[in-house]
Amino acid sequence: MENYHELLKQDVRFEEGLNACMNCGVCTAICPAAEFYDYDPRKIVDLVQSGDNAEIEKLLKSETIWYCGECMSCKTRCPRGNTPALVIMALRTLSQKLGFFTESEKGRQQFAIKRTVGENIFKYGYCVAAYAVSPELHPEQGPVWKYVIENSHEVFERLGGKIDEYGAGPLRKIPEDAKEELKKIFEVTGGMEMFDMIEEHSKKKAAEMGLQIDDEGIDNEYFIEVYTANNGKHTT
Amino acid sequence: MVNEGKKRVWSEYQKEIADDHFFYVRSCIRQSFYPGSEQFFLNFLRNDLGKDVYENPSHTTCTGIGYHGDIVPFSTTQTVVARHFALMKESGYKNIAISCVTSFGIYTEILETWKHFPAELEKTREYLFKATGREFDIPENMAHTSDIIYKFRNEITAKIKYPLINRLTGKPLKVVEHIGCHYAKMFPKHGVGGAEFPRVLSGMAEAWGGEVVDYPERRHCCGFGFRQYLVQANRGYSLSNTVKKFESMKPYEPDLVLTNCPGCNMFMDKWQYTAKEMEGMTFGSNGQSIPVLTYEELAGLVLGYNPWDLGLQYHMVQSEPLLRKMGIEVDSGDKYRTRDGRQMPIPKNLINA
């Protein structure tokens, strides 16, 4: 078994996020995730601080670390200057590096985020692009969004949008060389490696679960499973 | 003495906001959902105030949504942001204007990291050079675009056409302001008024005649929660947090919600629709829903811009009840027309329509 505490310490966010927790629980009191999920950031920080390797491994494989919404409200309130959400971010990164994330329903969702937001970055140059927010996957956007998508050229033109055009302006096309630079940055800094790891472990898990998965896109059984599955056991 | 003490406390929450020559960095969410807002910002600064605002066509995502969705490593995000700084340097600018609260949080986190962990800065310089051959400088001034509107709020007041006064009662309109968590909760000194006394939106609302509502869940998250919205199975978190906020503000009967962050705007608008569809819940007075406006949309309205050029018709909660209170004459025939005046279909089942 690897020493997880040592691995976490290599993440600058962990160094910044955890000085010394006195277990006051203010982070839990302010936490929006703790309102609705079976989630207590104080306990997580306390457990990580204890350095108990076996318990940290359980945590890395658990649903718990995926409940935080990263609003960072805990940072403002911690009297000791800790940031539980940064500890969570370090735990999530490590869980993915070690392939533990596929052990939990919430962890497996990383595949869905990679296949949507992650792919958007290389396709459109942005994490979110209007034309990638499909009304079918986002019914809560309501009839107005369906209308905007169906009439996108006319709607965006009136509001100054530059769909399919190069140059400056909102919703413009990103030049190919800029997208290439983005890719290069991902290759040099470990971003591509992270994407590859998410893919590799997700494919293994899909095989284990007997679900069909493709090399790209969202039209496959594994994507639909991880995007929609909710066992109803996450709330308090 | 007491006043002097208060002034001293307040002085800690001030920030310097550049006056001119801005390098504009675009938001993926604002441009997708509220392009009329960013056009107002650019046009107002350039044409009404005569300021220099530069957009570089090679600008891309900051990766913020991916970073907080935990699929993009911190080193990657730092280097992508460093590329933006390099574009800024190459274009001859030193003041960065950031149009998104998530991005603003990313930029502040990175600058603070570089201050406290200089090795991260050096590593980023090496990564960027290796990947792109570019070099960068750290901006001299960093502002969120709302900081800039805040700075020029009195210039807007001087030209105001429709103040935030209810024309029917003569009383100030009640404004709920929502700052967005990543604006100042992480690094209070980077926000106007910090995390304790956020002033960026309340300063605008009051300067334009409105009254700011203080309510119990004023600083609660809008509910986005990144992965808690990005993945369909988690959206109960997002909706529940938004409903918690709206239930808390409901007794105060706000006339509008004013937002800093385009993501918060989207959630506070669209989740009102969802709560109404699912549970029949409404949070405004007289069983109506509450219009949710960006600060650019509100600035445009008080200055007399055409609401349909600002894009208010593409919110789920329609703004006519607010426009009537402000005394704005609405040309409903112009609402769903193209730029060159052609009639478009009329969307159905919008709220407050």
Image: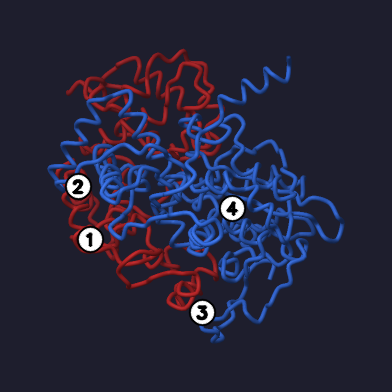
Chain colours: A red, B blue
Secondary element under disc 1, as helix, strand or loop, is loop
Query: Which residue, given by chain and number where applicable, does mark 4 sit on?
Result: B295
Asked whether the residues under marks 1 and 3 belong to the same chain, the reply is no
Q: Position of residue B95 (x, y in %)?
A: 40, 43
Asked whether the residues under marks 3 and 2 belong to the same chain, the reply is no
Residue type, label 1 = Gln
Determine whether, in the image, residue B14 is placed left or right of residue B92: right
The answer to whether B191 is drawn above or below residue A16 in the figure is below
Which of the chains bears the disc numbered 4? B
Asked whether the residues under marks 2 and 4 belong to the same chain, the reply is no
Label 1: few (<14), some or many (≥20) within 10 Å?
few
Secondary element under disc 3, as helix, strand or loop, is loop
Towards the viewer: A17 or A198: A17
Kindly report the distance in space between the C-alpha atoms of the residues bearing marks 4 and 3: 23 Å
Tell me if label 4 and label 3 are in contact, CB under 8 Å: no
The answer to whether A101 is drawn above or below residue B293 in the figure is above
Q: Say which residue appears at 34% left-offset and 35% top-offset.
A: B110
Determine whether, in the image, residue B123 is placed left or right of residue A46: left
Kindly report the distance in space between the C-alpha atoms of the residues bearing marks 1 and 3: 46 Å
Secondary element under disc 4, as helix, strand or loop, is helix
Q: Quadrant of the N terminus of chain B?
A: top right
Q: Choose mark 2 or mark 4, whichever is in front.
A: 4
Q: Say which residue appears at 38% left-offset and 37% top-offset.
A: B140
